Amino acid sequence: MIEIKNAKTIDGKRTDRKIPSDQTKIIDASTLTLLPALIDPHVHFRVPGAEHKETWATATDAAVHGGVTTVFDMPNNTPSCITLERLKEKKKIIDGQLKIPIRYGLYLGADQNHLEEIARCKDEIVGVKIYMGSSTGDLLMKDPAALEKAFQIAGENDVLVAVHAEDEDLIQERKRKLSLHSHASDHSIIRNAEVAKRAAALAIELAAKYGVRLYIAHTSTKEELDLVRQAKRQKLKVFAETTPHHMFLTTKLYEKLGTMALVNPPLRDTNEPVWEAIHDGTIDTIGTDHAPHLLEEKRLPYGKAPSGFPSIELYLALLLNAHAHGKISLEQIVRLTHTRPREIFRIKENDDVVLVDLEKTKTVEDAHLRTKAKWSPYHGMTLKGWPKFTILKGRVYEIT
Ligand code: DOR
Ligand code: ZN
């Protein structure tokens, strides 16, 4: 049995908590605050095919350091996870790498030549991921008829559709017209708000037509969020995720990090629309979009450098730091990182918790990170509020 004594609750009370376990441990939590463990509905743990960037051994260590005990992993692997056979194979490889028994779910990648897999896989997946714009990997739904068919099948089978909502045709058109492709900062101009809006609008239209539960990944613009607001008003089952980088970083980062600041969808000039949508309830969840690439890959010139940031181990500290600065309440953090993901993805309640020290201040150092990629765009930031213990399936992970 794990006994947590005298922990603060998010509403300022005190509580004791007993968690069934084969370990016997008493935690004096008088200086700590108790939260439900975080659910991260959007990670890229790189297996199979990119184990040089991350494995489930390193990623799960990073996850518990971020207070996360449940993750949903994306299908843009090598090879892409687009069939039941690949899904089963991927699961086998993951289970072989796990040292920390994280709770996980997998997305199926929608592929226009394998649409029948959506129904075949429905009981094995958390949802089907549709790339409406290209990103890392070769998953891209190019054919509009196949896109519509994927929504239809998902609707018929009650499968959640998660979309990477960027319009590929518009990306290509803007690349050609603007002839901007030499500086990292061009990325945010090419993949502008219109690119995101056009894809989100189509996804919402198809979700409405086929009664699909639609999860729009990494929303970052006012344009997308206004569409989500409107969809929610119409009582559509449309949910919005944002990311830590769209909450805390902007295009200013290009000056400091160049191509290391590349991510899809890109950084925006302002975080304001995201924060507004957090506060008015339009945004349902935060997904870290933990997407590790090695530093030497990220430092390649624009056009060659991959997009994405490792971030999962800083996830909770970034949110607690925002709380320390009065930007977000603990109730909102719990809603975004636990309650709404549980409702949207229909996850059963469990005993996993995280104990956080709201007073602890620490500076983020790349060298101390657990991710195999060993860097993050948050290097050098001093954050107030850090997790101290993550408890997963009755096991205590102390965070140092
Ligand atoms: O920046 C990104 N990186 N966006 C994505 O959509 C994919 C991800 C990755 O897997 O690297
Ligand atoms: Zn992603």
Image (cartoon, rainbow, N blue to C red):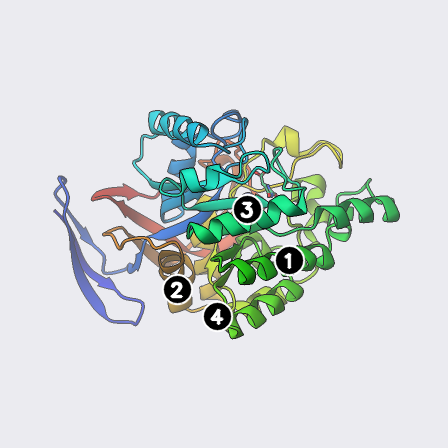
Q: Is residue 106 visible?
A: no
Q: Earlier in the sequence, mark 3 or mark 4?
A: 3
Seen in the image, is 142 located left or right of residue 155? Answer: right
Seen in the image, is 342 located left or right of residue 235? Answer: left
Out of 6 and 135, give the one closest to the viewer.
Answer: 135
User: Is there CB contact under 8 Å for labels 1 and 3?
Assistant: no
Circle on res. 335 = 2
**Vertical arrangement, residue 396 with respect to residue 345, above or below:** above
Q: Nearer the viewer, mark 2 or mark 4?
A: 2
Seen in the image, is 346 located left or right of residue 174? Answer: left
Q: Secondary structure at mark 1?
A: helix
Q: Secondary structure at mark 2?
A: helix
Q: Earlier in the sequence, mark 1 or mark 3?
A: 3
Q: Nearer the viewer, mark 2 or mark 3?
A: 3
Q: Earlier in the sequence, mark 2 or mark 3?
A: 3
Q: Nearer the viewer, mark 3 or mark 4?
A: 3
User: x and y percent of residue 39 in the render?
Assistant: 38, 51
Q: Which amino acid type is marked by label 1?
A: Leu
Q: Residue at x 43, y 27 (%)?
A: 85
User: x and y percent of residue 202 in the render?
Assistant: 64, 58
Report the residue marked by disc 1. Answer: 202
Circle on res. 150 = 3
Tell me the CA gap for discs 3 and 4: 42 Å
Q: Earlier in the sequence, mark 1 or mark 4?
A: 1
**Image quadrant in which the C terminus is located:** top left
User: Is there CB contact under 8 Å for labels 1 and 4?
Assistant: no
Q: Earlier in the sequence, mark 2 or mark 1?
A: 1
User: Is there CB contact under 8 Å for labels 2 and 1?
Assistant: no
Report the residue marked by disc 4. Answer: 326
User: Is there CB contact under 8 Å for labels 2 and 4?
Assistant: no
Q: Residue at x 47, y 54 (%)?
A: 155
